[in-house]
Image (spheres, helix red, strand yellow):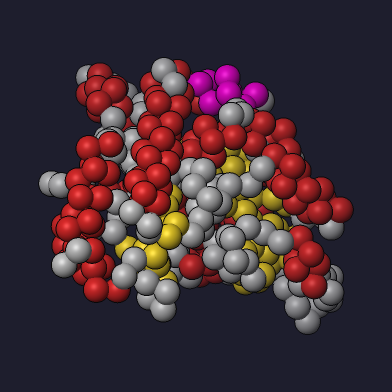
């Protein structure tokens, strides 16, 4: 199968991750997470994040939905950017499963705007409206932007001043950490994030995410919540095992750095042939505007998604196994199409 720039979900699995899965495929082990492998994986998380509770789930939507479920009160609502993955790309699952309304604020760059958020709190604590007491942000955002430490700190301060919890969708948090040169904890728990959805699938894992509770009180009933919402894996060791080398051997850094570096190289090569890049490339996502007539034949050569049909804007996502040769091949094809 050819490589694509469609999504980092399209990529394969890092060799060392596969080796770890094979390694734990010996004999029998306790089910549902009460095994030594899962316990070891949790300990690796604690080395990175400190005194936290950690639970493994199957996928990103599950990790976001169950994080929000753990945060909710009976009258809760969730405030997020209108481009947030939980609003745009999870088929209404957060609202269907949790029963909470998602209240969005406009965002051109994918980031949560505190000034606009304040207008949504005019009716906070009024029984005619959802009681907005959760904020959810994505790191990195769906627009490829990355929150700085100062930006997250300000959002956290705003949340606490208004008695709200802060959830972070960290599907690509590894790419953000590499881009900013900081640790996972410095990007989340140290800034007042209550719950982090920690991604792995987009960065070299076969499947699976982790939910990290910095506010441990919120995790008290989470074993029941995970089971009730169909995210408890019986043979848990095959999911949790992946996170051991991922964290212990810094595979997360290796994978995210390569994806980020190749995205930057892709941006540079596009600019050389006068293709407009519409975002500041910090992570592993490049947005560009192409002549309409080249998009379909280029997609047939290398799959990618059209982001904005009105602008002929496309999205290109690099992965842990993307190479400069992949970019060169893509650029060559694009050049050929441009001269036709």
Is residue 328 or residue 22 the one in the foreground?
328
Q: Is residue 252 visible?
A: no
Q: Position of residue 312 (x, y in %)?
A: 37, 72
261 relative to 163, above or below: above
Q: Quadrant of residue 116?
A: bottom right
Q: Residue at x 62, y 54 (%)?
A: 137
106 relative to 11, above or below: below
**155 magenta-colored:** no
* Stretch of the chain drawn in magenta: 43-50
Q: Quadrant of the C terminus?
A: bottom left
Residue 14 vs residue 100: left or right? left
Q: Position of residue 10 (x, y in %)?
A: 27, 49
- Provide the major secondary structure of the magenta segment: helix
Residue 200 vs residue 162: left or right? left
Is residue 159 or residue 53 the one in the foreground?
159
Q: Position of residue 86 (x, y in %)?
A: 52, 61
Q: Residue at x 53, y 50 (%)?
A: 280
Q: Is residue 19 visible?
A: yes
């Amino acid at each position: 199968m050819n490589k694509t720039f469609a999504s980092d979900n399209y990529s394969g699995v890092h060799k060392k991750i596969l080796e770890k899965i094979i390694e734990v495929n010996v004999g029998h082990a306790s089910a549902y997470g009460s095994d030594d492998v899962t316990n070891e994986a949790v300990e690796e998380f604690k080395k990175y994040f400190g005194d936290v509770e950690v639970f493994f789930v199957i996928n990103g939507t599950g990790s976001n939905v169950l994080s929000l479920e753990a945060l909710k009160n009976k009258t809760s609502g969730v405030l997020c950017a209108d481009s947030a993955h939980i609003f745009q790309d999870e088929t209404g699952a957060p609202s269907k499963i949790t029963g909470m309304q998602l209240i969005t604020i406009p965002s051109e760059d994918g980031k949560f705007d505190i000034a606009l958020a304040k207008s949504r709190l005019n009716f906070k604590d009024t029984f005619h409206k959802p009681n907005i007491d959760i904020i959810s942000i994505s790191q990195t955002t769906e627009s490829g932007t990355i929150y700085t430490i100062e930006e997250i700190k300000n959002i956290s301060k705003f949340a606490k001043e208004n008695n709200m919890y802060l959830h972070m969708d960290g599907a690509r948090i590894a790419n953000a950490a590499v881009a900013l040169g900081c640790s996972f904890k410095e990007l989340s728990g140290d800034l007042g994030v209550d719950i982090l959805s920690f991604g792995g699938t987009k960065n070299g894992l076969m499947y699976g995410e982790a939910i990290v509770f910095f506010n441990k009180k919120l995790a008290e009933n989470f074993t029941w919540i995970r089971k009730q919402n169909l995210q408890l894996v019986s043979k848990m060791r095959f999911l949790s095992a992946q996170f051991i080398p991922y964290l212990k051997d810094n595979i997360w850094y290796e994978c995210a750095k390569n994806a980020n570096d190749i995205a930057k190289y892709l941006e540079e090569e596009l600019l050389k042939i006068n293709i407009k890049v519409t975002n500041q490339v910090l992570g592993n996502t490049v947005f560009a505007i192409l002549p309409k007539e080249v998009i379909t034949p280029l997609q047939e050569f290398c799959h990618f998604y059209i982001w904005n049909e009105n602008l002929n804007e496309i999205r290109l996502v690099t992965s842990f196994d993307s190479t400069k040769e992949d970019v060169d091949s893509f650029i060559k094809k694009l050049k050929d199409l441009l001269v036709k």
